[in-house]
Image: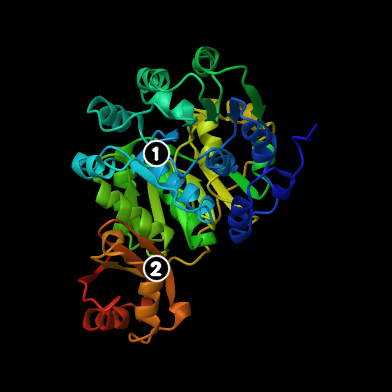
Amino acid sequence: MRSWCMNAFTSLALDPALLSALAALDYTEMTPVQALSLPPILDNRDVIAQAPTGSGKTAAFGLGLIARLDPSVASVQAIVLCPTRELADQVSKEIRRLASFVPNVKLLTLCGGIPLRPQLASLVHPPHVVVGTPGRIQELIDQGALSLDAVRVFVLDEVDRMLDMGFQDSITSLLKRSPKSRQTLLFSATIPDEIRKISRSLQRDPVEVATDAGADLPEIEQQFFEIDATRRFDALLRLLTTYRPESTLIFCNMRRDARELADGLVQRGYSALALHGDLEQRDRDEVLMRFVNRSCAILVATDVAARGLDIEDLPAVVNWEVSTDPDVHVHRIGRTGRAGRKGQAWSLVAAAEMPRIAPIEARTGQAVRWSPLPSTGGSESPIQATMSMLCIDGGRQEKVRPGDILGALTGDAGIAAEAVGKIGIFATRSYVAIRRDQAASALKRLREGKIKGRKFRVRTID
């Protein structure tokens, strides 16, 4: 009998195409949740898995669903439900990377907040994999544009958040519309009674796996700072000016606080943006791209808005306030310390928030570390972004690829390759980060030159 705790991906019965994709991504050793869940997933068992953000769960269910696809059959064979558009986008990108060596796999991301008509047009030729939010997928089914009749694998990602957002009825309805023979995979940071009820009614003898929260956060140094609630902003500035992280994600409990804090930091000269649910999709995309590609130094976000935000090298996370939910706290700090890098997590704690500390200690299995706020001896100059971001009005629809943009910059534009940062391609636009001292030159030369032999409108986003 095959062991379910072997750590190398090569120990699994994976198709050579999937092993090639894993090798290209430099994925060699499985994370704890992958080692526990992938063997039963590949054995076509239903699975209910408890694992925090950043634990590698997307690769676990992504490999499992790709392994069951038949690309020669034009039908929806796998569904992944996510609580937010941002998480759906992140999951889609990861599955595409994992399927990069499997020919003819088509994936669609279907979420609300964007026009319905293009999605209806895309579904004329059914994809093999659909990743999306429950509301939009339900809407497309109701219009007769999407069928679940051929679904083989149904994944619920971050089920606890979907239930918090009121999607329980939609989830149940969608699962009941798919074949009873499907494989059902539930992934969640917590497994409350509501999720167990869904599991009992809609899964078949599921394998339950769980990973230890503390073991998933080995490279994160947490510090808690007792503060006066009226001096919270000053406390934050002390941390920023003393430690000066190149990139910082600050979590707020309320969207109003996220807006006001970002505005306050900008007024002090900091490079900061807010990410919250009131933003239009295009604005959310641009805010996320600016933070990911280091053309914004500080992102102030609410928990729901930051779902799916996956940054490989994020030096610091700050809890502007302590979350009322210890699982949310673990999700927040899990944004830093990824891919073997060290991360800092700082929590500002006023007197009214002290009762929230004990549940965090119980959840993580360790006492929190209290530290005094640093003195004001650090550099007082505001933290600025290291990159600028250019927006090109051409994307996937114009078949623009990252290599085309990089070639235009390093070729005719004469920009050094090391001055070019991350490149993001969307349906009708593309974004590229340029070192700040090279941004004006890059903008001028791209406007005067061509990409893929065509002229595109190019502008700076600051």
Q: Residue 282, relative to residue 184: is it above or below?
A: below
Residue 411 lies, in percent from the top left, at 38, 85
Q: Quadrant of the C terminus?
A: bottom left
Please state which of the two labelled residues, at mark 1 or mark 2, is closer to the viewer.
Answer: 1
Q: Give the SS element for disc 1.
A: strand
Q: Residue 120, relative to residue 288: is it above or below?
A: above
Q: Residue at x 43, y 43 (%)?
A: 251
Q: Give the SS element for disc 2.
A: helix
Disc 1 residue type? Answer: Val
Q: Quadrant of residue 210?
A: top right
Q: Is residue 347 left or right of residue 437?
A: right
Give the distance between the C-alpha atoms of the residues marked 1 and 2, in whole angstroms.
Answer: 24 Å
Q: Nearer the viewer, residue 55 or 332?
A: 55
Whether residue 437 is visible, yes or no, is no
Q: Quadrant of residue 444?
A: bottom left
Q: Residue at x 43, y 46 (%)?
A: 92
Residue 74 lies, in percent from the top left, at 39, 40
